Image (cartoon, rainbow, N blue to C red):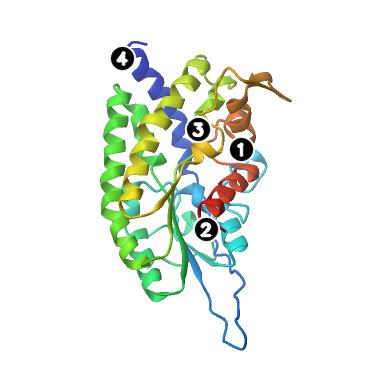
C-alpha cells in the first residue's frame, strides 16, 4: 500500500474517532464496605480517570439519554470489587487535558461526580488518593483516543497520528509517576480500546471499509497499544489490552454468521456486538462492551 493511500486510510479512521467526545456524566457508585469481627467498616476506594469510556457514555442514537450510566465498566468494577467509585473522568478528555487542563464542565460530568474545583483530573486524583491513603483499592486510566481525533483534518494523517501518540506517551510519562507516588502500592490499571474500526468492514459510511479494517489491526497492535503498554509498565502498572481481550487481533479470514450482516470476519462480528460502531458509527461500548472491559480489569487485578 502506498504511503499516500495509507495516510488517507488513517485519516478516514480518525474521522470516526472524533465521536469520542460526546457529552456524558460521571456519577459516583458507592460500594459496600467490609468488616472484620467487631472492627469498624473500612471503606476502600477506586479512583477512575480518563474519557468517555470511563464514564459509561452511550450515544443517544442507541435509544439512551446522552450521558453516562451505571452500565459503564468503572461502575461494574466498583460494584463487583466492593469499592466506592470516585470517577474523575471527563467528556472528550485528551491526555494533555487530563494532566494540565483545570476543571471539567458540569455538562461533562454526572450529578454525583465530585466537583474538580478548578483542579485537573491528575491533581484531583492525587488529592483523592492521598486523602484515602491506605484505603485505595484500585486506580484505572483510559486515555489517548481523543488525542488522535484532530489528525482527521490533517493532510498527512499518518504523520499526525505519530505525533499524537508521542504526545500521549509524554503526557503519560508526566502523569503516571505522580499517580504511583500518591497511590502507593495500590494497583494501577491502564486500558486501551476495542478496535472499533474493524466495524468499517460492514459500515456503509466507509466505501473502502475492508481496507480500513485491515489497516486498523496493525495500527492498534503495533503502534498505539505498544506505546501505551510501555508507559504503564514503567511505573509498575498493569496494562490491559482491551483490543486483544475483545478479539481485535483475530484472523479476518475466520468468519461468523452475524444476524444483521451475514457471514463476516469473527473480529468484526465481535466489535459490532461490543460497540455502537457498526450501527451508528459511534466508538463507544454497548453494555456488553462495558461488561467485557470490566471483566478484563477484574481478571487483571485478580478480583
Q: CA distance from mark 4 to mark 1?
A: 31 Å
Q: Residue at x 48, y 20 (%)?
A: 214
Q: Residues within 10 Å of mark 3 (few under 14, many from 20)?
A: many
Q: CA distance from mark 3 to mark 2?
A: 24 Å
**Disc on res. 195:** 3
Q: Earlier in the sequence, mark 2 or mark 1?
A: 2
Asked if labels 1 and 4 touch by Cβ distance under 8 angstroms, the answer is no
Residue 227 appears in which quarter of the rendering?
top left
Residue under pointer 2: 26
Q: Residues within 10 Å of mark 1 (few under 14, many from 20)?
A: many
Q: Residues within 10 Å of mark 2 (few under 14, many from 20)?
A: many
- For residue 2, above or below residue 102: above
Residue under pointer 1: 274
Q: CA distance from mark 4 to mark 2?
A: 41 Å
Quadrant (top left, top right, bottom left, bottom right) of the N terminus: top left
Q: Which SS class for mark 1?
A: helix
- For residue 6, above or below residue 116: above
Asked if labels 2 and 3 touch by Cβ distance under 8 angstroms, the answer is no
Asked if labels 2 and 4 touch by Cβ distance under 8 angstroms, the answer is no
Q: Which SS class for mark 2?
A: loop
Q: Is residue 190 left or right of residue 286?
A: left
Quadrant (top left, top right, bottom left, bottom right) of the C terminus: bottom right
Q: Residue at x 31, y 43 (%)?
A: 168
Q: Where residue 248 appears, x then y in whole percent?
A: 52, 31
Asked if labels 1 and 2 touch by Cβ distance under 8 angstroms, the answer is no
Q: Earlier in the sequence, mark 4 or mark 3?
A: 4
Residue under pointer 4: 3
Q: Earlier in the sequence, mark 4 or mark 1?
A: 4
Q: Nearer the viewer, residue 255 or 125?
A: 255
Amino acid at each position: 500500500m502506498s504511503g499516500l493511500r495509507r495516510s488517507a486510510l488513517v485519516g478516514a479512521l480518525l474521522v470516526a474517532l472524533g465521536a469520542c467526545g460526546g457529552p456524558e456524566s460521571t456519577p459516583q457508585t458507592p460500594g459496600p464496605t467490609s468488616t472484620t469481627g467487631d472492627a469498624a467498616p473500612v471503606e476502600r476506594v477506586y479512583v477512575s480517570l480518563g474519557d468517555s469510556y470511563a464514564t459509561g457514555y452511550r450515544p443517544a442514537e442507541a435509544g439512551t439519554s446522552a450521558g453516562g450510566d451505571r452500565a459503564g465498566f468503572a461502575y461494574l468494577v466498583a460494584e463487583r470489587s466492593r469499592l466506592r467509585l470516585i470517577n474523575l473522568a471527563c467528556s472528550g478528555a485528551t491526555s494533555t487535558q487530563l494532566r494540565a487542563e483545570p476543571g471539567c464542565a458540569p455538562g461533562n460530568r454526572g450529578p454525583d461526580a465530585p466537583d474538580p474545583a478548578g483542579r485537573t483530573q491528575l491533581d484531583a486524583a492525587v488529592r483523592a488518593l492521598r486523602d484515602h491513603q491506605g484505603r485505595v483499592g484500585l486506580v484505572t486510566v483510559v486515555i489517548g483516543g481523543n488525542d488522535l481525533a484532530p489528525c482527521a483534518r490533517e493532510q498527512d494523517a499518518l504523520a499526525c497520528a505519530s505525533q499524537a501518540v508521542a504526545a500521549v506517551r509524554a503526557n503519560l510519562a508526566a502523569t503516571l509517576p505522580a499517580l504511583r507516588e500518591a497511590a502507593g502500592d495500590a494497583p494501577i490499571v491502564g486500558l486501551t480500546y476495542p478496535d472499533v474500526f474493524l466495524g468499517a468492514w460492514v459500515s456503509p459510511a466507509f466505501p473502502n471499509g475492508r481496507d480500513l479494517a485491515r489497516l486498523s489491526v496493525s495500527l492498534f497492535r503495533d503502534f498505539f497499544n505498544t506505546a501505551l503498554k510501555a508507559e504503564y509498565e514503567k511505573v509498575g502498572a498493569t496494562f490491559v489490552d482491551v483490543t486483544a481481550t475483545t478479539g481485535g487481533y483475530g484472523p479476518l479470514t475466520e468468519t461468523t454468521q452475524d444476524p444483521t450482516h451475514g457471514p463476516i470476519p469473527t473480529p468484526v462480528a465481535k466489535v459490532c456486538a461490543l460497540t455502537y460502531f457498526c450501527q451508528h458509527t459511534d466508538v463507544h461500548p454497548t453494555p456488553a462492551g462495558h461488561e467485557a472491559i470490566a471483566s478484563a480489569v477484574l481478571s487483571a487485578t485478580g478480583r
